[in-house]
Amino acid sequence: MAALRPSAVRILRAIAVLGDDAVSWVVAEQAGLTVAELLTGVDELVALKLVAGGVPLTLTDPELGRVLLAGMGAGERRQAQLAAAQCLFDAGASAGKVAEQLSAAGPAGVPWAADVLRSAAREADNAESAERYLRQALTERLCSGERASITVELAIRAPFDPGEAIELLMTELRRSPQDDEVRILVPELQRLLMAHGRYAEIPAMLELASADGRAVAEVQLARTAMLARSLSSLWITTESDSRAIRATQATLAGRGAGEALRDADAVLADADARRDFDLCWHALFTLSVVAEPTRAEVAATRAKHEFAGRLDDWDLIELELCRVRALRRKGDLKATIALLRELLPKALLLQTPPLSMRVVWGLAEATRSAGAARPARRVMTGQGAAQVTAYELMACGDSRAAAGQIGSAIQSYLACGELLADNKVGNPELLRWRPAAVQALLRVGRSEEAGRLAEENLERAKAFGTNGAIGFAQYVLALTRPSEARRDLLLEAISRLQSAGQLLDEASAHYELGRAVGEDCAASHHLLRAVELADDCGARPLAERARALAGPTVSLGRRHGLTAQEWKVAQLVAAGRSNPEIAKELFLARRTVEFHLSGVYRKLEITGRHDLVQLLGEG
């Protein structure tokens, strides 16, 4: 080595530092030579059998590289590695190549270093490399809030167990004095604590986060959102200046739906809601429970587009679950099932049992209503979750009821109710455990208990105050009453459910009313309506039950393509009503009745009223 010219030694050192990235022009810059000078020197080194030709340039003996690096002073070697990183960065090399040089050199102190190291961590093919890059990123020159973001990435990407990840974030939270850092750390800490059943630690963590007045409003928003998603208002403050939090409080408690809806509308009208997901989520959660279902669905869809590219998988699932709730309230089983099937693999991938169970239970319930139920996928809470969830108890009850284990199903439903009560959740629409328990109790002849529970359900629904909640509760109460006492309850339930846009619930009420009324014409009308609504919703079991009860005349009308209004007119004609009487009963003009009647004659290929009466009488 002593016999070599200084330029040749610089070339060898540059190749040793650059390793696999030792292409000619980068080596030239590192060695302080022109490319022409480099090529001349390389030829000499090749002749001496110290360097192998080709791209990239390599040393013939790997040991020579180690000797060269060891012979450089620590400061000189670090300077060479930083220069190599800068050169590769300027040339647009991959983040991984630049990060390797930065990692070898130690903290660079240049503005771009942290970003490159974070990018390399995301691209790394193993958790150990990602951890190494992120730990170095924490030692670089950072902007406000950047340290907290990197710590969160480290907690997610490094090969930590959940306890280590939580402690890492808690340590950073204790250290972080800035509001923007607190806003970044709190949501991830909440998620980890909730996911692994450490609910009891959340209040202390949030108290620490808001100490000294740090990010109080944002912390409250995030806290309330997380608790609402798990159907728990236990730690939600009783008073809040935030309209978003007030809306969620009222929705969870099941009181003052009108005021909750006004608060939610005001939040969505605020420009801040289009920037702050937690703020927006509170409003969407309230709309999904309180507002007309189609309106809630549209609001959730619009929010998904507004936040496109800005949400992680967890928040995206939470947003989509607001849309799921709206679709299910509307009774659109096909869309509900399709969306939940899309969300299920994403939820399972997050390995967060409470979130996964919400998706699994929703999918099992919707598929069962659609008549395509398969055994519910079991998402065990043993994956770090120490507490059973209300959704798991509902899923357990539904599964047992479907298997004929009615006593066990009742126990699960009642346990779900106790858990929600303990968590101060009083809204009867968030999880319909009472209606499920009522139907299970009726199956085993415990009608008095079923009646008491149904009456309690109606009281809760009236306290909440939405037409949908009251209408469905009236339908459930009617199930516990004798047939002759059901009519008025079911008529009012149908009116409320129709105005609420809850089509499948309306179909169920029409079916029960068709069973309860004694007049053939009235029964057929309600059963036909149940068939039409259930078919539209994709509820095959309900449609088949109503169709079977209605008898062959319903099939006759459907087979010949009669519309709902034409079928009503035909039924009333068959019952002996005149056109003026039909017009009055259906709130139609006489000319409209005549129009529908002519359509009936044409489709059934008959000539008049006598034929129609005869045909339906035979049916």
Image (tube, rainbow, N blue to C red):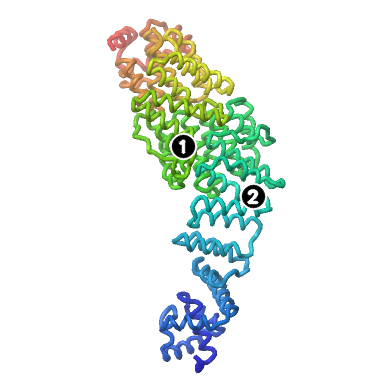
Q: Is residue 430 above or below residue 180?
A: above
- Residue underneath mark 1: 358
Q: Which mark is residue 484?
A: none
* Quarter location, residue 252: top right
Residue 603, visible in the rendered structure: no
Sequence order check, earlier mark of 1 and 2: 2
Quadrant in which the C terminus appears: top left
Q: Position of residue 175 (x, y in %)?
A: 65, 54
Residue hosting label 2: 182
Q: Is residue 64 placed above or below 125 in the rendered structure?
A: below
Amino acid type, callout 2: Val
Which picture quadrant has residue 410? top left
- Check whether the beta carbons of the residues at disc 1 and disc 2 lie within 8 A of each other: no
Q: From the viewer's perspective, is residue 580 above or below residue 537?
A: above
Give the distance between the C-alpha atoms of the residues marked 1 and 2, in whole angstroms: 28 Å
Viewer-side residue, 567 vs 383: 383
